[in-house]
Image: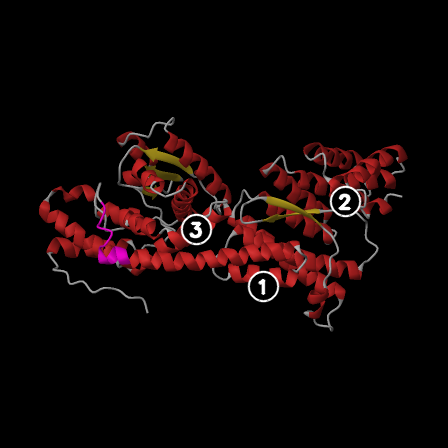
Amino acid sequence: MTYRPSILFTVTPVLASLVILFSVTVSADSSVTPSGPLSKRDYWISQKKLLDKNDARSTLAHKIFADVLAAADRRPGPIPELFILDEEGYPWARSLPDGTIILTRGAIDICLKAKSSDNAKARLAFIIGHELSHQVNGDFWHFFFYQGVRPELAKDPDMKKTLEQVMEIALLTDQVITKELKADQYGVIYASQAGYNVRRIVDTDVNFFREWTAATSPALLKGAMLDVNHPQIEQRSATVLITLKKVSEKVKVFDKGVEAYKRGGYVFAKSYFEDFLSVYQSREAYNNLGLVYYQMAADQLDKWKPDRPAFRLSLIIDADTRAKKTLSFRKQAQSSLARTMMKSESHESRFIKYANTASKYFREAAERDHTYSPAHNNLACVHFLKSEYSSAVGELDLSLTLNPENAEAYNNRGVAYLQMGRKIKVNLNEKVEADLEKAIELKPDYVDAIFNIAYFYKLNDKVKKKNLYAKRLAELDPGSRLLRALR
């Protein structure tokens, strides 16, 4: 049971009306977009001074914002953009419905109080991740609140007392606490996936969370913070720390899933990613779980149709640092996997089941972020396994639109064009050659693409060109088993 301190309020007519207003507004459907000047970027940049772009704090914040934005989920709508106000305090950090993320100089200064540069960056990454989570979830509860309860009304002593009471009620409102804790959770995940060591500040930086909770509490007044020893602040900061430590442990589970996948331990990887997704739904986890099912499907396809073409498809797995590690489609030890399968199922039925499940997870990853190129690349690989070559080309076209420098997608599309041409009896060799050459241009040491173009030339009896790329492959990987397929 969550401890919640009891507070006795004297209800005045003004207070009663404000409480009713707040109870109605925070219960509003999350799909309702708030309106009014405070919800617009123009209000803040016209009424407030922006921090000088040459200020080192601005440079740092924009760098971290770009990193965390790249790691965060995205929904259709405005692309988030950061604006930094030259203000000591209020509004500290704010997510606007038009895609704007506002930080103040004071918010950055709180982060810079950390004992080390890495901790300062992790603090700021967490705050930015928190605000981006509100964007992803369309969650703008604070606007419904502030439209009825404006901090600037606190100039009158009686109104100030009333506002303080209403804001303390806000602090204890279940929906508000739930939304803020959820944003805290995703703040840790997004910052971690962007490469910032948030775990360290979760474990050791208690004072930061107390101070930040006080600064951003619904009980704040303009330009001021509650005392960090305020009972509600103590409660929320303690709850935040407990929650964030739980998130930190789940991020470790995600890491274990990545390592298990790279070792070929797909059963273990599947368990780790499912554990992570049971609490936190991120595009990376959906993508990586899709890869597990892809490998399970590919294993069954090898057993069902062992004489398939030798072309190499490239998959993209996301690690917690957002570093894209290209893993080739390889047959790996599957003994533990085989023990989990029902003997009554045929290789064909297992292949279909696993391929469809992989597709489902890749689509979910793409739905979490419509700009997420790896999910479309990986979904194309599933289409390829199912001999749906035109669908594979379509997904790869989209992947390349999102990331024109994606060598893996060029490699895969070249192979898909070749198989599609054979299937529909149309010569697409120029497209095949162009895409494979482009993949190698982008990554000169790209073994899979070099093998694929050599194998393509072998199939087309272009011996000199085949030998040229075979020699290049031998120089890059002298002991490669792929060389046998080119003889």
Residue at position x 60%, y 53% in the image: 288
Give the magenta-colored segment's residue range: 225-234
First in sequence: mark 2 or mark 3? 3
First in sequence: mark 3 or mark 1? 3
Magenta stretch: dominant secondary structure: loop
- Residue 92, by quadrant, is top left
Residue assigned mark 3: 200
Judge the density around disc 3: few (<14), some (14-19), many (≥20) Cα neighbours within 10 Å.
Answer: some
Q: Return the residue found at the far front.
A: 115
Residue at position x 13%, y 53% in the image: 14
Residue 474 screen position, x and y as percent:
81, 39
Q: Which quadrant would the C terminus be assigned to in this image?
A: top right
Compared with 450, 308 (above or below) is below
Mark 2 near mark 1, Cβ–Cβ under 8 Å? no
Compared with 436, 484 (above or below) is below
Mark 2 near mark 3, Cβ–Cβ under 8 Å? no
Disc tally is 3
Q: CA distance from mark 2 to mark 3?
A: 50 Å
Residue assigned mark 2: 420
> SS for tag 2?
helix
- Residue 230, by quadrant, is bottom left
Callout 3, which amino acid?
Arg
Residue 227 screen position, x and y as percent:
21, 50
Residue 227 magenta-highlighted: yes
